[in-house]
Amino acid sequence: MAKSYVVVDLETTGLSPEKDRILEIGAVKLEDEKITDSFQCFVNCHRKLSEVVTNLTGITQEMCESGVEEEQALEAFLQFAGDQVLIGHNLPFDFGFLKWSFMRQKISFEREGIDTLKIARSCLKDLPSRKLEALCCHYGISQEKKHRALDDACATAELFCCMRRQFGEKKPEYFQPLVMQCKVKKQSCVTESQKRYLIDLIKYHRIQIDVSIDHLTKSEASRLIDHIILQYGRKKVNHHDEVEYEKEENGCGSTVRGVSGGNDCADDLECSSEFYVNDLKEEYKV
């Protein structure tokens, strides 16, 4: 059984690793059941935070904007974590965000990991809740700042040690690392024609958006364009300019649909709504 791990926790703008972004990375090195080093950084996600996120985490817009770029944050985390086994509470959630973020930076990220939530669900079935906060209460683990990445990583490290001491000999298989799995779609950056079209739509309809256009992926830009057109209508522009945009985008598999697009538009509106609503439910980071 491995004796050295990196325990990681993230704070994010929402629940979707594809559409939302990492706000904060916290991690600790756990060696022989002792925390020997720590890592923490804010990530500038280039989008406006919802009140729900700020109220839950205490992370303000100013704190977010003071953070480093995603690429820098990921490189620093890689340098800290090396190739160590990861531990997390609901680790697939954190790993999914890391995997998508690394993919956007064209960096491979494969790891083995141990999920303390999975262990708790198997070994502590009688508890009314296996949320991190509830498990910390169960084992008497102190949590100074809940829903903050470094503090939650420290709490998860202590939780892992408590559960391994209690169940490690009886159920050693639960504490063996497994290869983490996460399917990601290859992403490309927003195109110049998408940027121009978005800027024209925003100016024409006199609206504001909560994200930085330059930091969108191509698929995110397409969803945003669809959302604006469905809600506000097309921009009345020179027909040649619009045809030129659609030709360029359709050549790469993207379309811009009008208001009268029928069922296809309804599907796109539902997808776009997910992009805008940061629905941090009660089960967030269970």
Image: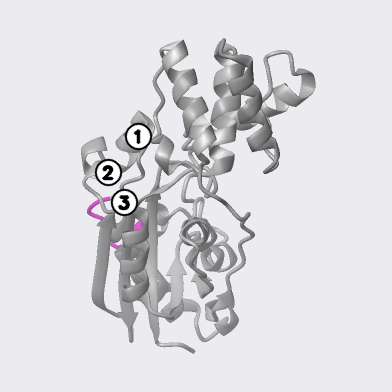
Q: How many marks?
A: 3
Residue 34 in which image quadrant? bottom left
Residue 218 in which image quadrant? top right
For the point 51% across and 51% down, the residue is 128
Where is residue 56 drawn, in percent x and y? 34, 39
Q: Does residue 278 appear in the picture of this structure? A: yes
Mark 3 or mark 1, which is nearer the start of the sequence? 3
Query: Compared to 230, does 15 lie above or below?
Result: below
Mark 2 or mark 3, which is nearer the start of the sequence? 3
Magenta-colored stretch includes residue 142: yes
Q: CA distance from mark 3 to mark 2?
A: 6 Å
Mark 1 or mark 2, which is nearer the start of the sequence? 1
For the point 55% across and 84% down, the residue is 172
Q: CA distance from mark 1 to mark 3?
A: 12 Å
Q: Are marks 3 and 2 in contact (CB under 8 Å)?
A: yes
Q: Which residue is mark 2?
A: 64
Q: Nearer the viewer, residue 142 or 12?
A: 12
Where is residue 252 drawn, in percent x and y? 67, 43
User: Which residues make up the magenta segment?
Assistant: 136-145
Specify the principal SS of the magenta part: loop
Q: Is residue 59 left or right of residue 160?
A: left
For badge 2, the amino acid type reads: Cys
Query: Compared to 100, does 267 lie above or below?
Result: above
Q: Which residue is mark 1?
A: 49
Where is residue 186 drawn, in percent x and y? 61, 55
For the point 30% across and 52% down, the residue is 148
Which disc, if any, is residue 43?
3
Which element carries disc 1, helix, strand or loop? loop
Which element carries disc 2, helix, strand or loop? helix
For badge 3, the amino acid type reads: Val
Q: Are marks 2 and 1 in contact (CB under 8 Å)?
A: yes
Which element carries disc 3, helix, strand or loop? loop
